[in-house]
Image (spheres, rainbow, N blue to C red):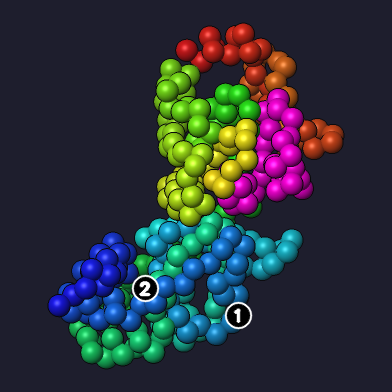
Amino acid sequence: MTSAAELSHQEKLRRIPFFSGLPAAMIDDLARQLRLERYRDGEVVFTEGSPGDSLYFIETGQVKVSIGSGRDERIINYLGPGNFFGEMAVLLNQRRTATVTVVIDADLWVLRKADLNALLDRYPTAALQIIEELSRRLTESIRRPLRQNTWKRVAVLGDEPWELAGALMNLTGECVALLDISGAELAQHVKYLPVELPVVSLSPQASAQTVAERMGVLAAAHDRVLVVLPHIGCEAAAKAVQLCEIVILIETPPNDWITLLAAPKIWYITQDRQDINPPSQSRDGVFEIHSPPASKRHQSLM
């Protein structure tokens, strides 16, 4: 009889293209072989050139796939829940061709190469399907352009953060999402929000794990995630600041808790012109996005 935990593993495997359509008995065996590993933001799963002995499936969080290091780093892709990585080295007996770094706390299911080989021996008819999926992934990797090394996870504190999100969408053409943990229920301000801007709300009392999981889901589906912070420090806000690459203060002085957690990565926005113009970096780390005065901003967005 299949346990509830094993059934959960099976369902996760069937959602992964690499294993969708495989025989049910093979999925059962896979579920029993998987082991869970948890990684925090910034931890490296494996490095470019290292031996490859495991295949990884992402349950929650997000990872960055890159080549090179330091100033020579080039980002190949970001992967989120439902994706997998490490298959090239495992199936082709190669060393790792890239470095994988966790950027949002991640739960990864790991399948060792020896266990995968044993499964393929027991289910030889499934080998062709796996080879076809591997070829598809290899073709995608070759065709995929390198990702720009830009800030993808941005924490925001201040009034009307949707204006910043709207400016980013207009300037970059990106798909942007707001994760609201401010407690202000931004979704209620729907008449001011850009139509294309999804807003997901979490209570400021949410756990750090919940914040990380929700950020991972949004990051997988959008080019950029803006996390709207509360003015008072809490566990959820601290985790968001830790996972974000930059904190932007909109006409707001830094609170003590933000300064303590994010001093090296705080930027400021000034709003003192009539139109929203392209952002520009000025002296002293001020990030300027100019918009109408407060009395006119709501009118201009209605």
Residue at coordinates 48% horizontally, 54% vertically from top-left? 209
Residue 49: mark = 1
Q: Which residue range is magenta in the image?
A: 237-264
Q: Residues within 10 Å of mark 2 (few under 14, many from 20)?
A: some
> In the rendered image, which residue does mark 2 sit on?
134
Nearest the viewer among 238 and 281 is 238
Residue ranking furthest to the left: 1
Nearest the viewer among 72 and 286 is 286
Asked whether residue 145 appears in the rendered view, the answer is no
Q: Is residue 124 magenta?
A: no
Residue ranking furthest to the right: 283
Q: Is residue 262 magenta?
A: yes
Which x, y percent locates residue 181? 51, 37
Q: Earlier in the sequence, mark 2 or mark 1?
A: 1
Which x, y percent locates residue 193? 47, 23
Residue at coordinates 31% horizontally, 90% vertically from top-left? 118
Under mark 2, the amino acid is Leu
Residue at coordinates 45% horizontally, 80% vertically from top-left? 54
Under mark 1, the amino acid is Gly
Nearest the viewer among 244 and 118 is 244
Q: Is residue 252 above or below residue 258?
A: above
Q: Is residue 273 above or below residue 1?
A: above
Nearest the viewer among 302 and 3 is 3
Question: Element under label 1?
Answer: loop
Asked whether residue 184 appears in the rendered view, the answer is yes
Q: Is residue 101 toward the left or the right of residue 11 in the image?
A: right
Which x, y percent locates residue 20? 25, 67
Q: Tell us which disc is closer to us: 2 or 1.
A: 1
Q: Is residue 247 above or below residue 166?
A: below
Q: Distance of mark 2 from mark 1, alpha carbons?
A: 20 Å
Q: Is residue 111 above or below residue 81?
A: below
Which x, y percent locates residue 64? 55, 61
